[in-house]
Image (cartoon, helix red, strand yellow):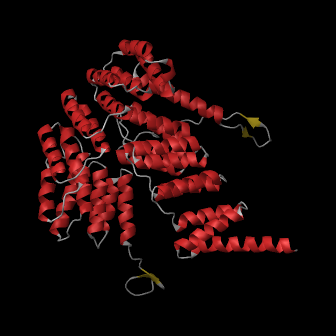
Amino acid sequence: MRLGGPGLGSVGRKRREVNPKLTTQKIIAFGSAGRWRAALKIFRDFPAKDVFTYTAAMTACCRCGRIGEAMEIFAEMKANGIRPTVVTYSALFGGAAYAREGWGVPVIPKLFEELKKDGLEVSLKMLESAVYTFAKAGEYEKMRDSFRELEGAGLEATPQFFMTLLKQLGPQGDIEEFMVWKDVMHDRGITLDVVGFTSLITSYSKSGRLLEALQVLDLMRGEGVDPNSITFTAILTAYERAEQFENALDFAKERIPDEMRDAILDKTVQRILMLSKGKTYEDLAKELEVRTRGEKLRSDPPVPSRRGQEIEAKPKAAKSSSHDFNSEEEYMEALSRFEKNKSSREALRLFYSLRSKGYEPSLNAYRLTMGACSKDENMGPAMALLSELKVLGYTPTPAMYLILLKGFGVDNKVDQVDKILDEMRLYGFPIDLKTYRGLITSFARGGNFKVAFKYKAEMEAGGLVADAATYTILLETLVGNGFLREAQRMEKEVNVHSFEIFGRLRRALDELNAAIAKMETSFSG
């Protein structure tokens, strides 16, 4: 018998009210994981929609390349009398830039028109997205008009903008247009380095334009910029896509110095060598599966029997349906599950098996697979995926670098962390307080306080101020390891910043005072 009046599920239990902020975060999280349909379901089921939930739903669609669905939600938002914000328009401009080729072109003029009606000012990010959209579609006149509008508004394009623009020109294969924009960069004091040239070469490689890739390589050397292993791997990939296997092997033998060779480059050469002997990609995928299974068997410990004897671990029969998915969403859900469970082997097996079937992994697929490797403390494959991503012409996302930083921080690999930070700066990605706090946490919990304080000083030199959470971590770990003097110094800084003392920070300070009192008692005794 059910008791209680309306709104009561049982005696004394009230119906839970939906938290708007939590709903918005869920929508964005599902969109980041590639599950735009799930994000839209949460959005549709939410009763009290506001500008934030509408913007979150549009952001989720844009991140999955669904600019059409995003514009439908935008029209619904306007029809309901909800005024968009600059953040809303930035999400839509970004979605147009990274939608499928040509899909974003008709969207850009509509967005500019609506932006003007709403009385909002155009931002640098919006104009840059417009330029990307037209460049990707080969609409060079519209691209130049958008760039002139950018400069006419008194906005200054960043070096990262030009790098991304050149990469968008790659699939079009227009070397003359590349030379025009290279001169524009030169006039503004921006020069192409090895990362910029390699990014363009990988873009040509990805679109199968071998001749253009070789022309950029010659231009790169003519300007005194030395190629690296990623550059050469991209050239070899261009030969491979053009099915010129013998020429690729000749290039590797004659033009690549031995000191440039690394694991990724050697693997590419081996793959091309096998293809030149008549093997297919399906054959290579089967060999990879056998090799992966063999490595797992060698790494698995013997299984103890009931009688205390050890028997060899036998391979489990693979389920025929384990990698058979009906949609991209199911594939992403499986990768997300492996990432959550720290199953790097399963994530890598799924990633490469589906790729061998002709499925092109998305940036989210790379991120989830790298996350599984990082959580499983298997950083070698994670770095290999990052290199592969750049070879294919993609720009790694800040989230990927944060995954790598966390993994190397846990492993106490300071040199690798510094390399990742330098690469983030090279791409123009901001290194914010959250990033530094994560590094400080990893090294402090590992007992390497010298490095933890190094990143704290680096953070403060960059104009960032440590927050209460950062000081809480430092106090907890310093007291736990007996470094009371350093902990007292942190306590003084906490007092200077006038943080509100409660929760974990209060407990950490109480533990510090208790440890000092105990030490003073032992000395007096």
Task: Compare residues 41 and 485 and report the one nearer the observer.
Answer: 485
Picture quadrant where residue 271 is located: top left
Task: Compare residues 265 and 41 and report the one nearer the observer.
Answer: 265
The residue lying at 59 percent from left, 55 percent from top is: 453
Residue 496, compared with residue 382, is above or below; it is: below
Residue 346, compared with residue 474, is above or below; it is: above
Picture quadrant where residue 321 is located: top left
Q: Residue furthest right?
A: 525
Residue 239, compared with residue 85, is above or below; it is: above
Residue 279, compared with residue 175, is above or below; it is: above
Residue 505 appears at what percent x and percent y?
A: 59, 71
Q: How many marks?
A: 0
Q: Is residue 431 visible?
A: yes
Q: Position of 176 compared to 358: left or right? A: left
Q: Is residue 369 visible?
A: no
Q: Residue furthest bottom?
A: 5
The residue lying at 39 percent from left, 51 percent from top is: 33
Task: Compare residues 265 and 58 and report the one nearer the observer.
Answer: 265
Task: Compare residues 90 and 107 and report the one nearer the observer.
Answer: 90
In which quadrant will I find the C terminus? bottom right
The residue lying at 46 percent from left, 43 percent from top is: 422
Residue 17 appears at what percent x and percent y?
A: 39, 77
Q: Position of 90 compared to 373: left or right? A: left
Q: Position of 479 compared to 112: left or right? A: right
The residue lying at 38 percent from left, 22 percent from top is: 236
Residue 438 appears at what percent x and percent y?
A: 53, 55
Residue 488 appears at what percent x and percent y?
A: 66, 68
